[in-house]
Image (cartoon, rainbow, N blue to C red):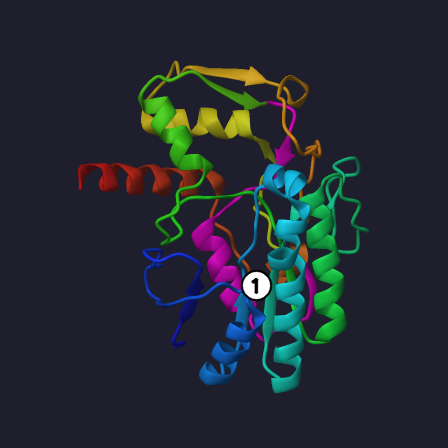
Amino acid sequence: FWRVIGTSRRTGADAVGSERVCLDLTALDDLEHLFSGLRPDAVIHTAAAADPNVCETHPDRTEPINVDVPAWLAGRCARRHIPFVFTSSDLVFDGEHAPYPEAAVPSPVNVYGGQKARAETAVRSACAGALVCRMPLLFGWSGSPHKGFDHEMIRAICSRTPLVLFTDEFRTPVDAQSAAAGLLGLLGRAAGILHLGGRQRTSRFDMGMRFARHLGVFRPSIRAGRQIEARMAAARPRDVSLISRQAYRLGYDPMPMDRAIEATVRRAASESAD
């Protein structure tokens, strides 16, 4: 068993099953002090400024956490000869040549994807044994108080609030618990680049309809939309579906989408009852 210690920039952001240290990771002197004091046996780095629109409008503000910090951590882990896992994104791809294997060359269409692509290169340069895991769209319970897009979707479906979801943006989503289990299971067992996508390619519209079915709402107020109709600062790739067979062969086994959605809906209902 691992003793898990997480970091958070804000107070009140405890994750279930872990201790928490409040720290701004971009304050490298403070990070150095923490790293030297804890002397970790392994590091899984998942923190990021992950909103593509925020990265597009504030590239200088998001560059340190998305590029500089993972490179710094990779270098420290290399010096201590300990495993390091960095979570990248399917958004390093342009969406024109899906599905993408690990060997596909990154070709980002927005600032966030570019930052993640540069971070991948920096991490692998700083730590030859590092594992870069490109993550897909995540949903479901994560143990964190921060709610994802699926929680907003559940709330909208249940309240019959009109909801527009894209039919022309495709990914290979995975639930957060399967993703976490995959990261932990691969820790120290692999190096290079792996994809941790789900087993099914789908659109957000299709996901919304699946959520509605599991919620027992058979005529949800969901309208099919297209990317071109939405005004967003960051360009969005059309299809960044991932091929994850290498990770599957190493034991990564994401939950089937409908089972994961059902579990998410049950969890949401339980939290509402509380």
The image quadrant of residue 143 is bottom left
> Does the magenta-highlighted stretch encompass residue 101?
no
248 over 35 or under it: above or below: above
Seen in the image, is 65 located left or right of residue 268? right
Q: Residue at x 58, y 18 (%)?
A: 225
What amino acid is at disc 1?
A: Thr
| Crowd rating for badge 1 (residues with CA inside 10 Å; few <14, some 14–19, many 20+) | some
Horizontal side of 88 relative to 274 (left or right) equals right
Task: Give the residue displayed 46% in from the left and 50% down from the top.
Answer: 176
* Left or right relative to 116: residue 209: left
The x, y position of residue 144, in whole percent, is 37, 52
State the quadrant of the C terminus. Answer: top left
Q: Residue furthest left?
A: 274
Q: Is residue 84 above or below residue 206?
A: below
Out of 227 and 208, give the one closest to the viewer: 227
* Residue that label 1 marks: 26
Residue 182 drawn in magenta? yes
Span of residues in magenta: 167-194
The residue tagged with tag 1: helix, strand or loop? loop
Which residue does the image show at 71% across and 60% down from the upper left? 120
Q: Nearer the viewer, residue 154 or 178?
A: 154
